[in-house]
Image (spheres, helix red, strand yellow):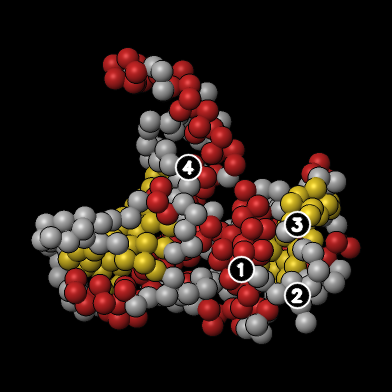
Amino acid sequence: MGVKVAIVGATGAVGEEMRRQLERRAFPLEGDPVFLASERSAGKRLPWRDGEVEVQAITPEAFDGVDIALFSAGGGRSKQWAPIATERGAVVIDNSSAFRRDDDVPLVVSEVNPDAIAHRPRGIVANPNCTTMVLMVAAKPLHDAFGLTSMVATSYQAAGGAGRTGIEELLDQAGEMVGRSEQLVGDGAALEASVQAQTFSKALAFNVLAHCGAFTEERYTDEEWKLVHESRKILELPALRVSPTCVRVPVVVGHAIAARLTFAEPVQRDAAMAVLSAAPGLEVEDGTGQHGEELAYPTPLASAGRDEVVVGRVREDLGDPYSLNLWVVGDNLLKGAALNTVQLAELVAAGA
Protein backbone atom coordinates (compact mmCIF):
# COMPACT_ATOMS: atom_id res chain seq x y z
CA MET A 1 0.00 0.00 0.00
CA GLY A 2 1.33 3.41 -0.96
CA VAL A 3 1.10 6.68 0.91
CA LYS A 4 -0.76 9.69 -0.49
CA VAL A 5 1.38 12.81 0.02
CA ALA A 6 0.64 16.51 -0.41
CA ILE A 7 3.24 19.30 -0.47
CA VAL A 8 1.95 22.67 0.73
CA GLY A 9 4.23 25.35 -0.69
CA ALA A 10 5.27 23.14 -3.60
CA THR A 11 6.48 26.07 -5.73
CA GLY A 12 8.93 27.47 -3.16
CA ALA A 13 12.64 26.71 -2.79
CA VAL A 14 12.10 24.15 -0.03
CA GLY A 15 9.02 22.74 -1.76
CA GLU A 16 11.07 22.20 -4.90
CA GLU A 17 13.66 20.30 -2.86
CA MET A 18 10.92 18.24 -1.19
CA ARG A 19 9.70 17.19 -4.61
CA ARG A 20 13.21 16.14 -5.58
CA GLN A 21 13.70 14.18 -2.37
CA LEU A 22 10.42 12.27 -2.72
CA GLU A 23 11.54 11.13 -6.14
CA ARG A 24 15.21 10.54 -5.31
CA ARG A 25 14.53 8.49 -2.18
CA ALA A 26 11.85 6.34 -3.84
CA PHE A 27 9.28 7.28 -1.20
CA PRO A 28 6.40 4.75 -1.21
CA LEU A 29 3.88 7.00 -2.90
CA GLU A 30 0.34 6.20 -3.91
CA GLY A 31 -0.01 7.84 -7.28
CA ASP A 32 1.28 11.34 -7.92
CA PRO A 33 1.76 13.73 -5.01
CA VAL A 34 -0.64 16.63 -4.56
CA PHE A 35 1.07 19.98 -5.13
CA LEU A 36 -0.56 22.86 -3.26
CA ALA A 37 0.28 26.57 -3.24
CA SER A 38 -1.38 29.98 -3.18
CA GLU A 39 -4.17 30.82 -5.61
CA ARG A 40 -1.79 32.82 -7.80
CA SER A 41 0.28 29.66 -8.39
CA ALA A 42 -2.74 27.43 -9.03
CA GLY A 43 -2.69 26.01 -12.54
CA LYS A 44 1.08 26.00 -12.86
CA ARG A 45 2.53 22.67 -13.90
CA LEU A 46 5.54 21.34 -12.03
CA PRO A 47 7.82 18.57 -13.27
CA TRP A 48 7.31 15.17 -11.67
CA ARG A 49 9.18 12.10 -12.84
CA ASP A 50 8.57 11.80 -16.58
CA GLY A 51 5.69 14.23 -16.66
CA GLU A 52 4.08 17.12 -14.84
CA VAL A 53 1.56 17.66 -12.04
CA GLU A 54 -0.73 20.69 -11.88
CA VAL A 55 -0.55 22.90 -8.80
CA GLN A 56 -3.81 23.28 -6.88
CA ALA A 57 -4.91 26.11 -4.61
CA ILE A 58 -5.00 25.21 -0.92
CA THR A 59 -8.54 24.26 0.10
CA PRO A 60 -9.96 21.91 2.74
CA GLU A 61 -11.01 19.47 0.03
CA ALA A 62 -7.45 19.30 -1.32
CA PHE A 63 -6.48 17.25 1.76
CA ASP A 64 -9.16 14.59 1.26
CA GLY A 65 -7.46 11.21 0.95
CA VAL A 66 -4.04 12.62 1.87
CA ASP A 67 -2.08 10.51 4.38
CA ILE A 68 0.86 12.87 4.97
CA ALA A 69 0.99 16.61 4.24
CA LEU A 70 4.41 18.27 4.06
CA PHE A 71 4.12 21.99 4.85
CA SER A 72 6.64 24.62 3.80
CA ALA A 73 4.57 27.72 3.13
CA GLY A 74 5.29 29.91 6.17
CA GLY A 75 3.99 29.98 9.71
CA GLY A 76 0.77 31.81 8.89
CA ARG A 77 -0.41 29.22 6.37
CA SER A 78 0.67 26.41 8.69
CA LYS A 79 -1.40 27.79 11.55
CA GLN A 80 -4.38 28.20 9.23
CA TRP A 81 -4.24 24.96 7.25
CA ALA A 82 -2.41 22.34 9.34
CA PRO A 83 -5.38 21.79 11.71
CA ILE A 84 -7.68 21.49 8.69
CA ALA A 85 -5.37 18.93 7.11
CA THR A 86 -5.33 16.83 10.27
CA GLU A 87 -9.12 17.02 10.54
CA ARG A 88 -9.24 15.55 7.03
CA GLY A 89 -7.06 12.63 8.19
CA ALA A 90 -3.54 13.70 7.24
CA VAL A 91 -0.44 13.68 9.43
CA VAL A 92 1.18 17.09 9.02
CA ILE A 93 4.95 17.54 8.97
CA ASP A 94 5.51 21.26 9.25
CA ASN A 95 8.67 23.09 8.27
CA SER A 96 7.71 26.46 9.81
CA SER A 97 8.13 27.72 13.36
CA ALA A 98 4.36 27.65 13.98
CA PHE A 99 4.24 24.57 16.22
CA ARG A 100 7.82 23.99 17.36
CA ARG A 101 7.22 25.11 20.93
CA ASP A 102 3.85 23.36 21.27
CA ASP A 103 4.13 20.65 23.94
CA ASP A 104 1.75 18.43 21.95
CA VAL A 105 3.85 18.64 18.78
CA PRO A 106 7.10 16.66 18.64
CA LEU A 107 10.16 18.49 17.29
CA VAL A 108 12.19 15.87 15.48
CA VAL A 109 15.52 15.39 13.72
CA SER A 110 15.46 11.98 12.06
CA GLU A 111 18.89 10.85 13.32
CA VAL A 112 18.68 12.56 16.71
CA ASN A 113 15.30 11.81 18.34
CA PRO A 114 13.24 9.67 15.92
CA ASP A 115 11.30 8.01 18.74
CA ALA A 116 9.69 11.36 19.60
CA ILE A 117 7.62 11.23 16.42
CA ALA A 118 5.37 8.51 17.80
CA HIS A 119 3.69 10.87 20.29
CA ARG A 120 1.82 13.44 18.21
CA PRO A 121 -1.58 14.09 19.84
CA ARG A 122 -2.37 16.95 17.45
CA GLY A 123 -1.39 14.93 14.37
CA ILE A 124 1.42 17.41 13.66
CA VAL A 125 5.19 16.90 13.65
CA ALA A 126 7.49 19.94 13.58
CA ASN A 127 10.72 20.22 11.63
CA PRO A 128 13.34 22.25 13.55
CA ASN A 129 14.97 25.43 12.34
CA CYS A 130 17.70 24.62 9.83
CA THR A 131 20.48 25.99 12.07
CA THR A 132 19.35 24.04 15.11
CA MET A 133 18.99 20.92 12.97
CA VAL A 134 22.56 21.04 11.70
CA LEU A 135 24.00 21.58 15.17
CA MET A 136 21.90 18.87 16.84
CA VAL A 137 23.22 16.13 14.54
CA ALA A 138 26.66 16.70 16.08
CA ALA A 139 25.63 17.77 19.59
CA LYS A 140 23.31 14.84 20.41
CA PRO A 141 25.87 12.01 20.24
CA LEU A 142 28.29 14.10 22.29
CA HIS A 143 25.54 14.78 24.83
CA ASP A 144 24.78 11.07 25.08
CA ALA A 145 28.45 10.34 25.75
CA PHE A 146 29.48 13.21 28.04
CA GLY A 147 26.33 15.01 29.28
CA LEU A 148 25.86 18.42 27.68
CA THR A 149 25.29 21.28 30.14
CA SER A 150 25.78 24.43 28.06
CA MET A 151 26.76 25.69 24.65
CA VAL A 152 27.90 28.88 22.98
CA ALA A 153 26.82 28.78 19.34
CA THR A 154 27.58 31.30 16.62
CA SER A 155 25.89 30.57 13.32
CA TYR A 156 26.97 31.73 9.87
CA GLN A 157 23.75 31.47 7.88
CA ALA A 158 23.44 31.47 4.10
CA ALA A 159 21.27 33.80 2.07
CA GLY A 160 19.23 30.76 1.07
CA GLY A 161 17.92 30.59 4.63
CA ALA A 162 15.65 33.45 3.60
CA GLY A 163 14.37 31.47 0.62
CA ARG A 164 14.58 32.14 -3.08
CA THR A 165 14.34 35.93 -2.60
CA GLY A 166 17.40 35.85 -0.33
CA ILE A 167 19.44 33.99 -2.92
CA GLU A 168 18.37 36.35 -5.69
CA GLU A 169 19.15 39.42 -3.60
CA LEU A 170 22.66 38.21 -2.79
CA LEU A 171 23.46 37.36 -6.41
CA ASP A 172 22.02 40.64 -7.71
CA GLN A 173 24.04 42.63 -5.18
CA ALA A 174 27.22 40.74 -5.97
CA GLY A 175 26.79 41.42 -9.67
CA GLU A 176 26.21 45.11 -8.96
CA MET A 177 29.17 45.51 -6.61
CA VAL A 178 31.86 43.34 -8.19
CA GLY A 179 32.95 46.09 -10.58
CA ARG A 180 33.22 48.72 -7.86
CA SER A 181 36.53 47.61 -6.38
CA GLU A 182 37.69 51.13 -5.46
CA GLN A 183 34.65 51.62 -3.22
CA LEU A 184 34.97 48.11 -1.82
CA VAL A 185 38.48 49.02 -0.69
CA GLY A 186 38.23 52.72 0.05
CA ASP A 187 34.63 53.72 0.80
CA GLY A 188 32.71 50.68 1.93
CA ALA A 189 30.19 52.65 3.96
CA ALA A 190 29.07 54.63 0.91
CA LEU A 191 28.88 51.47 -1.19
CA GLU A 192 26.86 49.66 1.47
CA ALA A 193 24.45 52.61 1.74
CA SER A 194 24.00 52.73 -2.03
CA VAL A 195 22.80 49.15 -2.31
CA GLN A 196 19.06 48.61 -2.03
CA ALA A 197 18.49 45.85 0.54
CA GLN A 198 15.03 44.32 0.84
CA THR A 199 15.24 40.78 2.16
CA PHE A 200 18.14 41.65 4.47
CA SER A 201 18.68 44.72 6.63
CA LYS A 202 21.90 45.78 4.87
CA ALA A 203 23.86 44.82 1.76
CA LEU A 204 24.88 41.17 2.14
CA ALA A 205 27.26 40.80 -0.81
CA PHE A 206 30.92 41.12 0.26
CA ASN A 207 29.63 41.66 3.78
CA VAL A 208 28.70 39.93 7.04
CA LEU A 209 25.55 40.95 8.93
CA ALA A 210 25.32 40.58 12.71
CA HIS A 211 21.58 40.35 12.28
CA CYS A 212 19.69 37.24 11.27
CA GLY A 213 15.95 37.22 11.85
CA ALA A 214 13.84 39.77 13.71
CA PHE A 215 14.88 41.30 17.01
CA THR A 216 12.69 40.19 19.92
CA GLU A 217 13.21 39.86 23.69
CA GLU A 218 16.41 40.95 25.42
CA ARG A 219 17.96 42.20 22.17
CA TYR A 220 18.22 38.70 20.71
CA THR A 221 16.70 37.78 17.35
CA ASP A 222 14.07 35.13 16.78
CA GLU A 223 16.71 33.02 15.01
CA GLU A 224 18.81 33.13 18.18
CA TRP A 225 15.88 32.23 20.40
CA LYS A 226 15.13 29.27 18.12
CA LEU A 227 18.57 27.89 18.90
CA VAL A 228 17.80 28.21 22.61
CA HIS A 229 14.28 26.77 22.76
CA GLU A 230 14.61 24.14 20.05
CA SER A 231 17.89 22.72 21.35
CA ARG A 232 16.36 22.32 24.80
CA LYS A 233 13.29 20.56 23.41
CA ILE A 234 15.10 18.20 21.03
CA LEU A 235 17.68 17.17 23.62
CA GLU A 236 15.11 17.09 26.44
CA LEU A 237 17.30 19.45 28.45
CA PRO A 238 15.04 22.27 29.69
CA ALA A 239 17.87 23.74 31.79
CA LEU A 240 20.44 23.74 28.97
CA ARG A 241 22.33 27.04 28.94
CA VAL A 242 22.61 28.42 25.41
CA SER A 243 24.43 31.59 24.32
CA PRO A 244 23.50 32.18 20.65
CA THR A 245 24.62 34.65 17.99
CA CYS A 246 23.20 34.30 14.48
CA VAL A 247 25.05 35.95 11.60
CA ARG A 248 24.08 36.22 7.91
CA VAL A 249 26.94 35.61 5.46
CA PRO A 250 27.25 35.92 1.65
CA VAL A 251 26.86 32.20 0.95
CA VAL A 252 24.09 30.97 -1.33
CA VAL A 253 23.34 27.65 0.41
CA GLY A 254 24.95 26.07 3.47
CA HIS A 255 24.83 27.06 7.13
CA ALA A 256 27.80 26.80 9.49
CA ILE A 257 27.98 26.91 13.28
CA ALA A 258 31.00 27.48 15.49
CA ALA A 259 30.08 25.85 18.80
CA ARG A 260 31.65 25.57 22.23
CA LEU A 261 29.99 22.66 24.03
CA THR A 262 30.44 22.17 27.77
CA PHE A 263 29.79 18.83 29.44
CA ALA A 264 29.23 17.35 32.89
CA GLU A 265 32.51 15.44 32.69
CA PRO A 266 35.91 16.20 31.15
CA VAL A 267 36.12 15.49 27.43
CA GLN A 268 39.17 14.68 25.33
CA ARG A 269 39.40 15.09 21.58
CA ASP A 270 40.12 11.41 20.83
CA ALA A 271 37.03 10.27 22.72
CA ALA A 272 34.90 12.95 21.06
CA MET A 273 36.18 11.98 17.60
CA ALA A 274 35.24 8.36 18.20
CA VAL A 275 31.72 9.43 19.15
CA LEU A 276 31.33 11.76 16.18
CA SER A 277 32.71 9.22 13.70
CA ALA A 278 30.03 6.72 14.72
CA ALA A 279 27.09 9.15 14.69
CA PRO A 280 24.33 8.66 12.08
CA GLY A 281 23.92 11.34 9.42
CA LEU A 282 27.26 12.91 10.32
CA GLU A 283 30.58 12.96 8.45
CA VAL A 284 33.90 14.03 9.96
CA GLU A 285 36.38 16.13 7.99
CA ASP A 286 39.14 17.03 10.40
CA GLY A 287 42.84 17.35 9.67
CA THR A 288 45.32 20.14 10.35
CA GLY A 289 47.96 19.07 7.84
CA GLN A 290 50.63 19.44 10.55
CA HIS A 291 51.56 15.79 10.97
CA GLY A 292 51.35 14.40 7.47
CA GLU A 293 47.57 14.09 7.33
CA GLU A 294 45.49 15.97 4.82
CA LEU A 295 44.36 19.48 5.67
CA ALA A 296 40.63 18.94 5.99
CA TYR A 297 37.71 20.93 7.31
CA PRO A 298 34.14 21.38 6.05
CA THR A 299 32.83 24.47 4.29
CA PRO A 300 29.27 25.66 3.66
CA LEU A 301 29.87 25.76 -0.10
CA ALA A 302 30.95 22.11 -0.17
CA SER A 303 27.91 21.15 1.91
CA ALA A 304 25.47 22.36 -0.76
CA GLY A 305 23.67 19.36 -2.24
CA ARG A 306 25.03 16.98 0.40
CA ASP A 307 22.74 14.89 2.60
CA GLU A 308 25.09 14.63 5.57
CA VAL A 309 25.96 17.18 8.20
CA VAL A 310 29.74 17.61 8.34
CA VAL A 311 31.88 18.39 11.41
CA GLY A 312 35.50 19.47 11.72
CA ARG A 313 37.95 21.67 13.65
CA VAL A 314 37.23 19.47 16.69
CA ARG A 315 39.50 20.58 19.53
CA GLU A 316 39.70 20.65 23.28
CA ASP A 317 39.05 24.04 24.81
CA LEU A 318 42.21 25.87 25.85
CA GLY A 319 40.83 26.98 29.21
CA ASP A 320 38.26 24.38 30.25
CA PRO A 321 38.77 20.58 30.24
CA TYR A 322 34.98 20.14 30.26
CA SER A 323 34.52 21.98 26.96
CA LEU A 324 34.99 21.16 23.30
CA ASN A 325 35.09 23.48 20.28
CA LEU A 326 33.92 22.40 16.85
CA TRP A 327 32.70 23.61 13.45
CA VAL A 328 29.55 22.11 11.90
CA VAL A 329 28.13 22.73 8.43
CA GLY A 330 25.08 21.52 6.51
CA ASP A 331 22.89 22.30 3.54
CA ASN A 332 20.07 24.40 5.02
CA LEU A 333 17.65 23.67 2.18
CA LEU A 334 18.43 19.96 2.10
CA LYS A 335 19.10 18.41 5.51
CA GLY A 336 18.06 21.64 7.21
CA ALA A 337 14.58 21.52 5.71
CA ALA A 338 13.41 19.30 2.84
CA LEU A 339 15.43 16.14 3.47
CA ASN A 340 14.59 15.93 7.16
CA THR A 341 10.91 16.55 6.35
CA VAL A 342 10.87 13.63 3.93
CA GLN A 343 12.82 11.47 6.39
CA LEU A 344 10.16 12.20 9.00
CA ALA A 345 7.49 11.27 6.47
CA GLU A 346 9.32 7.98 5.95
CA LEU A 347 9.15 7.33 9.71
CA VAL A 348 5.40 8.03 9.72
CA ALA A 349 4.87 5.85 6.64
CA ALA A 350 6.75 3.03 8.37
CA GLY A 351 4.34 3.18 11.28
CA ALA A 352 6.25 5.37 13.73
Picture quarter containing residue 187?
top left
Q: Residue under circle 3?
A: 50
Whole-angstrom CA distance, mark 4 to mark 3, is 29 Å
Check the picture and name the quadrant holding the N terminus: bottom right
* Left or right, residue 46 beside residue 156: right
Asked if residue 300 shows in the view, the reply is yes
Q: Residue under circle 2?
A: 3
Front of the two marks 2 and 3: 3
Q: Does dot 3 land on a helix, a strand or a loop?
A: loop
Q: Residue under circle 1?
A: 25
Which residue is depicted at the point 35% across and 59% down?
A: 328
Q: Position of residue 66 (x, y in %)?
A: 80, 70
Amino acid of disc 4: Val
Q: Residue under circle 4?
A: 252
Which residue is depicted at the point 28% across and 56% down?
A: 297
Q: Position of residue 185 (x, y in %)?
A: 29, 20
Q: Earlier in the sequence, mark 2 or mark 3?
A: 2
Q: Earlier in the sequence, mark 4 or mark 3?
A: 3
Looking at the image, do the residues carrying marks 2 and 3 touch, with CB atoms under 8 Å apart?
no
Which residue is depicted at the point 79% across and 55% down?
A: 51
Q: Does dot 1 land on a helix, a strand or a loop?
A: loop
Amino acid of disc 2: Val
Front of the two marks 4 and 3: 3
Looking at the image, do the residues carrying marks 4 and 2 touch, with CB atoms under 8 Å apart?
no
Front of the two marks 2 and 1: 1
Q: Earlier in the sequence, mark 4 or mark 2?
A: 2
